Structure formats: C-alpha cells, structure tokens
Image (spheres, rainbow, N blue to C red):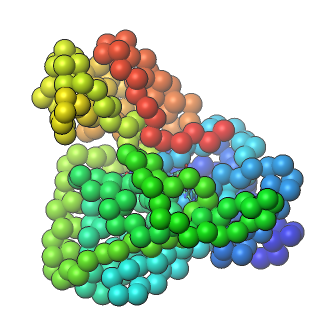
Amino acid sequence: MDVKEASGERFEARELTTFKGGGWATAFMPENEEEFAEIVRKLQSEGRDPFVMGGGSNVIIADGEIDTPIVCTRKMNALRFEGDVAAFEAGATVAKLLREARRRGLGGAEFLEGVPATLGGALRMNAGAFGEQIADLAVYARILTDKGGNLQVEEIKPNFEYRKGPSGIILGGAVKLRKMSEEESLERRERFLKFRAAKQPRKPSCGSVFKNVATSEDRAREAGLAAAAKMCAGGICVLPAGALIEACGLKGRKQGGARISQLHANFIVNEGGATAGDFLALARLAEEMVYEKFGLRLEREFVLLE
Ligand SMILES: Cc1cc2nc3c(=O)[nH]c(=O)nc-3n(C[C@H](O)[C@H](O)[C@H](O)COP(=O)(O)OP(=O)(O)OC[C@H]3O[C@@H](n4cnc5c(N)ncnc54)[C@H](O)[C@@H]3O)c2cc1C
C-alpha cells in the first residue's frame, strides 16, 4: 500500500462492527506497524485524530457519514510463541490465540472463547468473563506514543481496572499462558461456550451494553436486588446491569430493528435493519428508567463513534 497516497476506503458499519447497524466511515487497514504509524502521522498532520478499531465488537458507529477516520488493526494479526508467552500484533484475534495455544499444549484464556475481539481491543477493554480477565495474563503492551511530534513505540507493563486497560494506541502485546492438555482446554472451551449459549443472544450485538454497577449492600437490599448482587465484600456489591434493566420491565423492548434481548437484558440485538439510532434509543431508555427506579447511573461499556 502506498501510504502517502492512501485515503482510506468507505465502509458500512455492518462491515466494521458486530452490531452490524449504523452509518458509513472511512477506514484504513494497515498491514504492519510501520504502515500504521505512517497513517496516524498523516492523519494527525491533517488535524484528523483517528479512532483505532479492532474487531468492532464494542463499537456503535452513528448513523449517516461520520467524520472521524478509523484505523483498523484487523490486518495486523501476527502471533508468535516463545515458551508459554504469546506475543501478538494488535489485530490478532482472541480466536486465533485460543486455537494456536491449544495446538501447543497451552491454555488459560478459555474464558474469552466466543468473544469476537482482537487482542488489542481485549487489552484496551480489559475483556473478561466468568471472574477472569485478560489483565491476569498480560505481560506487556506495545504502545504508539507521541514524543514531541515523533511517533515511537514503547513497551509498557499495563495497568488495568474493571473493563479498562492501557490508554493510547496499542500496536501489540504479550500474554502468558500455562501448560494445559488439549483435552482440558477443549473441556474448558465447551463449558464456557455452553454457558454463553444459555445466557447470551446469538443475534448481532456489541456485547454488554453497560458495565455492572458497584453500590452498597444496603442499597442493593433497598432496591430488592440483593439476590442478584455479586461479589459483596466490605459492604460493596456489584449489581449486574442486566438485572437492573430487567427489573425495569425492559426485557424484549423493541425499537425499529433493535431489541433489548429476551435472553439477557444487558444485550441489545439487531434483529434486522437496526440503525445506531434504534440502538441508542433503547440504551437511553434503560439509562433513564434505571435512574428513575433505583437512583443508579448505568455506565456505558460500548463506545459510540460519531
Ligand atoms: C457476542 C459478544 C460477546 C462479548 N463477550 C464479552 C465478554 O465476555 N467480556 C468482555 O469483556 N467483553 C465482551 N464483549 C465485548 C467486546 O468483545 C470486548 O469489549 C472486546 O475487548 C473489544 O475488542 P475489539 O477488538 O472488538 O475492540 P473494538 O470493539 O474494535 O474497540 C473497543 C474499544 O477499544 C479500542 N481499541 C481497539 N483496538 C485498539 C488498539 N489496538 N489500540 C487502542 N485502542 C483500541 C477502541 O478504540 C474502542 O475504544 C462481547 C462482544 C460481543 C459482540
């Protein structure tokens, strides 16, 4: 690709995101770190700050034609093993890591089975499930940093919080796995996938719409949600966002082509032809009703790109 000439290509949201509804965007698909840095440099010199996208499994692209240019990592997908450490380019998928690890007698990331993410996106969002998260495995992240106008790559030991990883542009990273027989890894895979199939809808979505809500044990009891609260410690409870939305009677609520899933109220699915507007109307309704009923603010997990 001649980066200097590259002006990106127009893509529809359905080609870039797993929700498969929304508008149009110009996206660049670099194939290596040098191309990536060159595109970022070019866009920044034009005063256009790019949005970095991986698998698009947590992103909603607003309807219409959005201005923000996207730099998508999906063609940067190399994965290399050294012992039990897997070093990856940001666009390598979770599925590829799991598959390649299993072939080498390694495991430990099976909690991410079924998550349609890139490893860069998983690091950025500290993706996790079933009480485990990628923070537990991360060794380092390679970050593209701006040093007084010069773009450089830095290897850092990332800090993590709940659904939040290192900030900045992640070009790659490494995770440490553990020895595991193929049989055990496959058994874990089946267990996690079975759980997902029972609890999560299959229709296009962006995964969990909201983060779970931390509150006091007293508050959870007052709201009548003590039974749904998880991980109570030191008087702090975590209330699943889905339980709060369900308690507002919103399961199954439809707007245009989008619906709050009947299976899990923290998922908004695209039943065909959903726009970003349909999705956002349901997300706002959930925010308003949960606040009205419980006085609790839902925090968005998805990223809206406008
Ligand atoms: C069916 C389904 C199941 C899911 N299950 C889970 C689950 O169990 N647990 C969970 O935590 N999440 C889950 N998700 C949500 C989503 O997969 C995660 O948030 C994932 O980490 C996003 O990765 P991505 O590559 O798709 O990132 P994107 O959706 O493309 O981007 C998400 C955010 O990360 C940023 N980003 C992406 N790549 C980079 C990069 N290289 N450098 C800097 N920033 C970057 C983007 O700018 C954006 O802010 C699920 C989603 C779906 C659709």
Q: Horizontally, is 226 left or right of 5 in the view?
A: left
Asked if 65 appears above or below 71 in the picture, the reply is above
Image quadrant of residue 109? bottom left
Q: In this view, does 2 lie to the left or right of 63?
A: right
**Residue positioned most to the left:** 227
> Which residue is located at x 30 percent, y 87 percent?
104
Out of 65 and 100, give the one closest to the viewer: 100
Q: How far across and how far down the image is residue 38, in percent?
A: 77, 69
Q: Residue at coordinates 41% horizontally, 70% vertically from top-left? A: 139
Q: Which of 89 and 95 is in front in this view?
A: 89
- Number of numbered discs: 0
Residue occupying the far top of the picture? 292
Q: Is residue 211 above or below residue 133?
A: above
Tell me if residue 21 comes above or below residue 143 in the rendering.
above
Q: Name which residue lies at 30% across and 16% down.
A: 294
In the displayed structure, does residue 120 sit left or right of residue 130?
Answer: right
Q: Position of residue 127 (x, y in %)?
A: 38, 54
Residue located at (45% from left, 55% from top): 159
* Of the pair 185 and 258, the residue shown nearer to us: 185
